Image (cartoon, coloured by chain):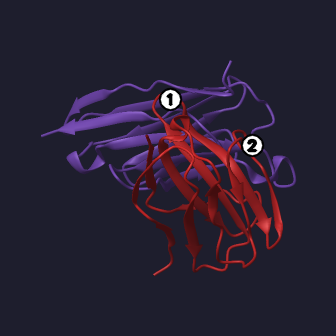
Chain colours: A red, B purple
Amino acid sequence: EAQVTQNPRYLITVTGKKLTVTCSQNMNHEYMSWYRQDPGLGLRQIYYSMNVEVTDKGDVPEGYKVSRKEKRNFPLILESPSPNQTSLYFCASSIRQGHYGYTFGSGTRLTVV
Amino acid sequence: QKEVEQDPGPLSVPEGAIVSLNCTYSNSAFQYFMWYRQYSRKGPELLMYTYSSGNKEDGRFTAQVDKSSKYISLFIRDSQPSDSATYLCAMTPPPGTSYGKLTFGQGTILTVHP
């Protein structure tokens, strides 16, 4: 089944403790992206990657890092999480940059206390 | 001003009603327009897309784009309880600009009650 897999689905952590949210897609998609979803603000892009070793900032990149060492994987790293990073996170992929058909993962609900 | 504005609702309708969901946008460079549906505890899934002004129909769903007014709509006919979800409009400039970033509306929460 073609899908984007995120882990974990739920995570509660403490301020300052580094964490990684994994994302993997099995569709050989070139383009991958991370979004956060907050009430009243909708989905906002954090980082994106057009291909292996090519990443760039989205609209809200502060406090986040990403890497794209393999085509299928695009982990999101929070080096020192803070409470304002409490949110619902989605990884998405598409065939290529500019394609309309994004496939989203099921989301990771992160709480930073 | 946000680039894409969407009434967050919530919208509650009886089964069988016609539902109208709307978004306005300010960036005239947007060329591709999409509607995503998001069920509770799930990621958004693509419902419909279009890249020109006019109407596009798919079963009970009709997407409408008016580029001159910078206004898009999604109509749901004969709404069903299974249509209860959050509906997100999204749009993007043509490929080669802004690296394929979708700009989303805030989402409208729809509940269809039996």
* Residue A12 vertical placement versus A71 (above, below): above
Q: Depth check: give the residue in front, B53 or A15.
A: A15
| Coordinates of residue B62 in the picture (x, y in percent) | 47, 44
* Residue A74 vertical placement versus B113 (above, below): below
Amino acid type, mark 2: Gln
Instruction: Give the quadrant of the N terminus of chain A.
Output: bottom left
Residue sitting farthest toward the top:
B1
* Residue A74 vertical placement versus B38 (above, below): below
Q: Depth check: give the residue in front, B90 or B33.
A: B90
Tell me if B62 is positioned left or right of A85 in this view. left
Tell me if B86 is positioned left or right of A44 in this view. left
Q: Depth check: give the residue in front, A14 or B31.
A: A14
Tell me if B78 is positioned left or right of A51 in this view. left
Tell me if B93 is positioned left or right of B22 in this view. right
Q: In which quarter of the image is residue B91?
A: top right
Which residue corresponds to the image point at 61% horizontal and 36% vertical from the top-left?
A: B65
Amino acid type, mark 1: Asn
Residue B31 got which mark?
2
Q: How many numbered badges does the structure rendering display?
A: 2
Local packing at callout 1 (Cα closer than 10 Å; few below 14, some 14-19, many 20+) is many
| Coordinates of residue A51 in the picture (x, y in percent) | 79, 70
* Mark 1 belongs to chain: B
* Mark 2 belongs to chain: B
Q: How far apart are marks 2 and 1 (CA)?
A: 17 Å
Which residue corresponds to the image point at 43% horizontal and 60% vertical from the top-left?
A: A106
